[in-house]
Amino acid sequence: MKMSIVGTGYVGLVAGVCFADVGHEVICVDNNEEKIRRLKDGQIPIYEPGLSDILKSCQSRIEFTTDIGKAVESCSVIFIAVGTPEKADGNADLGPTLQVIDSICKAATVKKYIVLKSTVPIGTAKELSAYIDQKTKIPHEIINNPEFLKEGAAVEDFLRPDRVVIGCKTKEGKNIMEELYAPFVKNGHPIYFMSNISAEMTKYAANSFLSVKISFINELAALADTVGADINDVRKGFTSDKRINPAFFYPGVGYGGSCFPKDVQALIHTAKKNHQTMDIEAAADAVNDKQKLVLFEKVKNRFGDLKGKHFAMWGLSFKPRTDDVREAPALYLLRALTKAGATVTAYDPVATETAKAYFDAPFGLAESTVDATKDADALLIVTEWNEFRNPDFAKIKNNMKNSIIFDGRNCLSIPDVLKNGFEYHCIGRGIATTETSL
Ligand code: NAD
């Protein structure tokens, strides 16, 4: 089938490449000329494992352009995957989506199926449909197809989705989406058809629940730190109950990224508009705000005055296997440390360029994990990249002023750290300083 996708970012590009990979003909549109230039050159402008290889194998079926008019003219199915960032009032900003809708209305001469892949507030499809009816007499159907991929595993998630959710109104809309997704659900992965509004709400329900899971375990970890329990043992103990899925239940430095923070806010905002409250989601959000500064609080408790102190920071991206630094906990930590008079040298395997562009607090950059630790009063681990899990303790110890590690992701083994003579602060496992605290 021929289709276009407007918005060639973390979602749109992965979707476009995967649709092309299974045989569809795809036109990817973006208004960022530099991005499209690089894609035409065969370069991938984001870091997403596996994406580059698939693009190579389906290059004949995918086209990149800034010309949305051309894409609208030649395809009856147009996906929208532009950003829906948070506005100051907590609602999602539909400005980029409306820009695309305007362009579609201008260029369309026959019926168009407009598929909202972006995460849009509950009720958006209905509102956009009324908006389009006012602008043009060309018939249309708006379909919701929220995306559930995880950055860092996006290709695998798209090719083998847990489920595909479609919100649509007509048989034709349903048939089109069935045909598009048939290759991805051959192995029994379900497609759930529902109303537009239910599909919109499903996406917010998923992200809010995951945020609640993270804040729940983080809150327990704080209590474990205080009372002297080990959150890893507690986690194993309570998640082995069949009713509690253990996945995605690890304590850390809080959730970030371009989805959870804004989606929780958008859901709270939608409830408010409908004279309701979302108390659990609001609590998850508040716990997360505190959690983003958990390492800062631990560092302050350990050192007191941070003026003149210097720290090594491992990890800038909001999670491993991505260069995405939007709302990354590293940024909140960096802001707090520099405000308190400390300096930071950071290392990240792929996110240094994005961090330089996005972060508004000063930091130095190192070429390697070991280089980052030079003259550091302590090492702070913020993202659980695999290469941080087995450090060369002798080299970093030699480099550092003090042998102290604050591990915001519990990615080191307590016996290893202690054997190598480090003081170790982690999340929900107390402070390990001697072998006896094992
Ligand atoms: P992104 O910022 O990476 O990509 C958006 C792209 O849209 C950018 O390349 C931008 O240049 C382009 N764009 C903006 N306005 C445009 C316009 N008028 N015309 C053409 N192109 C335009 O965003 P993303 O992370 O891919 O997220 C897109 C949507 O998918 C959001 O609603 C997000 O909430 C949702 N989502 C994201 C993820 C994720 O992991 N990133 C997962 C699921 C859902």
Image (spheres, rainbow, N blue to C red):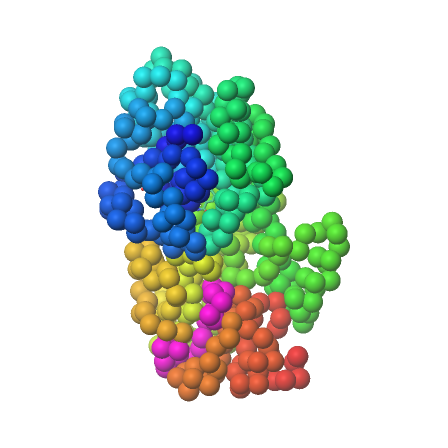
Q: Residue at x 58, y 38 (%)?
A: 186
Where residue 77 appears, as percent x and y from the top left, is: 41, 27
For ligand 1, give the image quadrant: top left
Residue closest to the eye, 40 or 200: 40
* Residue 284 vertical placement versus 87 (above, below): below
Residue 312 in percent (x, y) is at 40, 73
What residue sits 47% from the left and 60% below the top? Answer: 320
Residue at 36% from the left image edge and 49% from the top image edge: 56
Kindly give the residue lying farthest to the right in the view shown: 241
User: Would residue 309 be visible to someone looking at this image?
Assistant: no
Relative horizontal placement of residue 111, taking residue 171 as reference (left or right): left
Tally of numbered tags: 0
The quarter holding residue 220 reads bottom right
**Span shown in magenta:** 370-388
The quarter of the displayed image where residue 317 is located: bottom left
Q: Quadrant of the C terminus?
A: bottom right
Counting from the top left corner in percent of width and height, residue 265 is at: 49, 42
Residue 400 as seen in the image, left or right of residue 245: left
- Compared with 91, 54 (above or below) is below
Residue at (48% x, 77% y) in the render: 391
Residue 411, given in percent of the width and then of the height, sits at 54, 69
- Does the magenta portion include 124? no
Q: Is residue 254 left or right of residue 104?
A: right
Query: Can residue 139 be seen from the camera position used here?
Result: yes
The answer to whether 383 is drawn above or below residue 303 in the figure is: above
Camera-side residue of 392 and 406:
392
Q: Quadrant of the N terminus?
A: top left
